[in-house]
Image: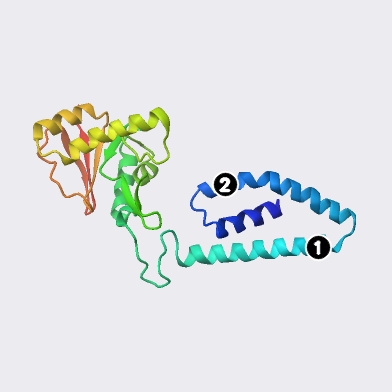
Amino acid sequence: MLIFILVSMSCVVFFNFEGGGAYFYMYCLIPILLLSTFAFDHLRIKNNNLFKIISLIVMFVGVFCFINLSISWRNYGWGGFPNNENRRIWDKRATINYDEWEAMKWLKDNSNLNEVFFSDRRYFAHEKLGKELGRFFGYSALTGRQAFAEGDDFIQGENKIIVNEHWNLVNGFLFSNNRLEQEKLLREIQADYFVQSLRFNNKDYLGLDSLKLVYENKSIKIFKILK
């Protein structure tokens, strides 16, 4: 197990695995590690010094990679932060500020477990990959409530089609300037709350009959959708 952990950490460093995907790649090492175990055991039985040398090398590389990875994540983090006190955020859409956290806490405490919300938060730019990622699930994670339309990067098959259909409705509402069309889309969107992030969207939705403002701070407006 120790060898598995050390080799896994080494591969994470050398092959630049990122996020939870790193653990899935590690499974392919299991057959190799099993064969290595048999080989090491064979060398050990024969009291061969080669076993000791190989073991020391593996342990040294593993410990080095573990320390290197720990320092890298501490000093830089995801997205290549510079090593100074003023860390650069590559895309503010990938962060949640204190006001947003307070708003999500309010929504969690003042809504039912089976109620659904939709929001204008979805994408953020990934600096290393050079593309937009549609997997912003901070609001649903903090509220414990289901989002009507969530990022689709981790969804496959028919569910991905459904999520994209939901986002077509949400985008239609967000970008429309026609009040009647917005009211119609609100009826089609099967949600109980609309969470507006004022950090990125200052559009005025107060004139809509189907929306009732129930919470507001500097960064968030939460509307109850009237059925």
**Which residue is rendered at x = 57% and y = 46% of the image?**
25
When the figure is inspected, residue 94 is found, relative to residue 154, above or below; the finding is: below
Residue 122: x, y in percent?
A: 31, 44
Name the residue: 86% across, 56% down.
Answer: 44
Q: Considering depth in this image, is 222 or 50 the residue closer to the camera?
A: 50
Q: Which residue occupies 37% across, 39% down?
A: 152
- Quarter of the image that includes the C terminus: top left
The color scheme shown is: rainbow
Characterize the local packing of mark 2: few (<14), some (14-19) or many (20 or more) Cα atoms within 10 angstroms.
few
- Give the amino acid at mark 2: Tyr
Residue with the most extreme bottom position: 84
Helix, strand or loop under label 2: helix
Viewer can see residue 28: yes
Q: Which mark is residue 25?
A: 2
Q: Earlier in the sequence, mark 2 or mark 1?
A: 2
The circle on residue 63 is none
Foreground residue, 191 or 19? 19
Q: Mark 1 highlights which residue?
A: 52
Q: Residue 210: where, in percent of width, then height?
A: 15, 32
Residue at the image point whose x is 37% and y is 33% from the top: 160
Mark pair 2, 1: CA separation: 28 Å
User: In front: 92, or 33?
Assistant: 33
Type of the residue with mark 1: Lys
